[in-house]
Amino acid sequence: MLRGRVADSFGKPVVGAVVEPFGCKNDQSRWWGRMPGVDPLAITNLNGEFVVTSEQPAIAFDLRVSARGLATRLFLLAPTG
């Protein structure tokens, strides 16, 4: 499970941001693209919070975060736990 919070440059929560995992790493391998058993996306709540879950143990996810009016940002190997 990966929990996070999306905030703007002023530290205010971004509501409705789309968080998409596009890569994953576990103990044995690292891969990109289709990830069976991993949430395809998460949408931030009123506090800018989101959760991405995986059926299989994962150490980290690569994430693409996009929100209306803000630049898309990539986060590589965001740790789970």
Image: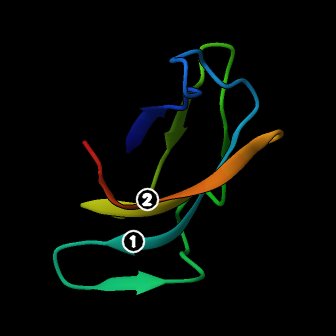
Identify the residue position indicated by label 1 in the image.
24
Q: Callout 1: helix, strand or loop?
A: strand
Name the spot of residue 39 as percent of width and height, x first: 59, 56
Please tell me how many numbered marks the rendered image carries: 2
Name the spot of residue 77 as percent of width and height, x first: 32, 63
Asked whether residue 65 is in view, the answer is: no
Question: Which residue appears at 25% of the width and 85% of the height?
Answer: 29
Using the rendered view, name the quadrant where residue 20 is placed.
Answer: bottom right
Name the spot of residue 27 as percent of width and height, x first: 16, 74
The CA distance from mark 1 to mark 2 is 12 Å
Identify the residue position indicated by label 2 in the image.
55
Residue farthest along the left direction in this orientation: 27
Q: Amino acid at mark 2?
A: Glu
**In which quadrant is the C terminus drawn?**
top left
Question: Which residue appears at 30% of the width and 60% of the height?
Answer: 60
Name the spot of residue 52 as percent of width and height, x first: 51, 46
> Is 25 drawn above or below residue 8 in the view shown?
below
